[in-house]
Image (spheres, rainbow, N blue to C red):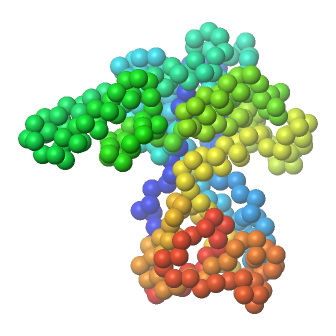
Amino acid sequence: MLPSDTIPPMKVGIVGLPNVGKSTLFNALTRAGAEAQNYPFTTVDPNVGVAAVPDGRLQRLAEAVGGVRAVPATVEFVDIAGLVRGASRGEGLGNRFLAHIRECDAVAHVVRCFEDENVAHVHGGIDPVGDAETVNAELLLADLATVERRLEQASRAAKSGDPKRRAEAAALERLRDHLAKGGQARTFPEPGEVSEVLRTLLTAKPTLYVANVDEGSLAAGNAYSAAVEELAGREGAGAVRLCARLAAELAELPAEEAREYLGVLGVEESGFEEFVRAAYRLLGLITFFTFNERECRAWTVREGATAREAAGRIHTDMERGFVAAEVGRWEDIVAAGSWARAREEAKVRREGRDYVMRDGDVLLVRFNA
Ligand SMILES: Nc1ncnc2c1ncn2[C@@H]1O[C@H](COP(=O)(O)OP(=O)(O)OP(=O)(O)O)[C@@H](O)[C@H]1O
Ligand SMILES: [Mg+2]
């Protein structure tokens, strides 16, 4: 039986100006030890790493189903080189990183919200909204160029008089005007008309702003992070607050020590757990669980996935030979203390292939190999 490695992992690209903390965040996420240094352009080739999705339910479920090993779901992160003004014209490392962003399913946009005179800022002062706009302007210009090219092709095709082609050209024209006025593709009001080109646009990607604050501002935020949250609200993007440096340091400590340190700062988490969860929500992903006598595992599927599709996440053979599924809720299994007990209590249902999975479902697949 082959694992279903045909399904690409969800990929989140980490973008932002140089020296704002992207690689530091990446390290915290993946503990991959990507080089984080106090000078711009430390990162030239994107680092790709896999992060476990923090999920407090998993450990409890693993205990209930027999005290087995807990295996978390994962998301892939790509640490992309710092973006500078002129990138859309190929300045700095221009086109290279625009291409890297294009390959991602979502974008985490890191903005500097910490003051530290030892860390150079590429444009002088701390100005997270201005920084974000600099990066966004480059992404927008790149998108505008893409749409202009498509519009040119569509206009030529529309000369034939084919009404479908003409409608397409008209929609592209409206999209171009939207971008030219500074609107991100994400907020274009008629996405249905241009869905194909939208898939290739950088500003159409689900975006999460990451306000990278100093340790002391983690609990309550600061004026910079508040401004970033407001910006995100205006743009239909998400926002989280974290301290990348702290998260990276804590990733190196034993769990108990890390918890104590966070307690001193008055927070439960360094913000990085919330970041992964927010990225997950942003992508419209949900988690389901499976278990056997060796391990209890969390899996990722898109919202709306059916039981059969979920089975395909585990093994292509399970999808192909799918017969039925037994489905329980994680909290019922934990409350019952075991799967067998939950079944006795009628907390486990039999479902067919078209059952729509819910976040927190525990799935046992019956299939013909
Ligand atoms: N929250 C924070 N508070 C203080 N310093 C921080 C914080 N986050 C990151 N730093 C520091 O900022 C510097 C730059 O970080 P990092 O190398 O991660 O930036 P980068 O965005 O990846 O830069 P580049 O675009 O050059 O690759 C490092 O010295 C790092 O320790
Ligand atoms: Mg870097």
Question: Is 244 or 204 nearer to us in this picture?
Answer: 204
Quarter in which the C terminus is drawn: bottom left
Query: Residue 357 at what x, y percent from top left?
Result: 57, 70
Residue found at the far left of this picture: 160
Decide: is 356 above or below 96. Answer: below
Query: Residue 252 at what x, y percent from top left?
Result: 76, 41
Q: Quadrant of residue 168?
A: top left
Decide: is 107 above or below 119. Answer: below
Query: Residue 196 at what x, y percent from top left?
Result: 32, 46
Residue found at the far top of this picture: 124
Decide: is 303 above or below 146. Answer: below
Exactly how many numbered labels are in the figure?
A: 0
Q: In this rendering, does residue 150 appear at all?
A: no
Q: In this rendering, does residue 280 appear at all?
A: yes
191 on left or right of 339? left
Query: Residue 154 at what x, y percent from top left?
Result: 19, 37
At 50% from the left and 28% from the top, the residue drawn is 81
Question: Is 10 or 147 nearer to us in this picture?
Answer: 147
At 67% from the left and 67% from the top, the residue drawn is 360
Decide: is 129 above or below 191. Answer: above
Residue found at the far bottom of this picture: 344
Q: Quadrant of residue 245?
A: top right
63 on left or right of 27? right
At 81% from the left and 79% from the top, the residue drawn is 337
At 16% from the left and 46% from the top, the residue drawn is 163
300 on left or right of 195? right
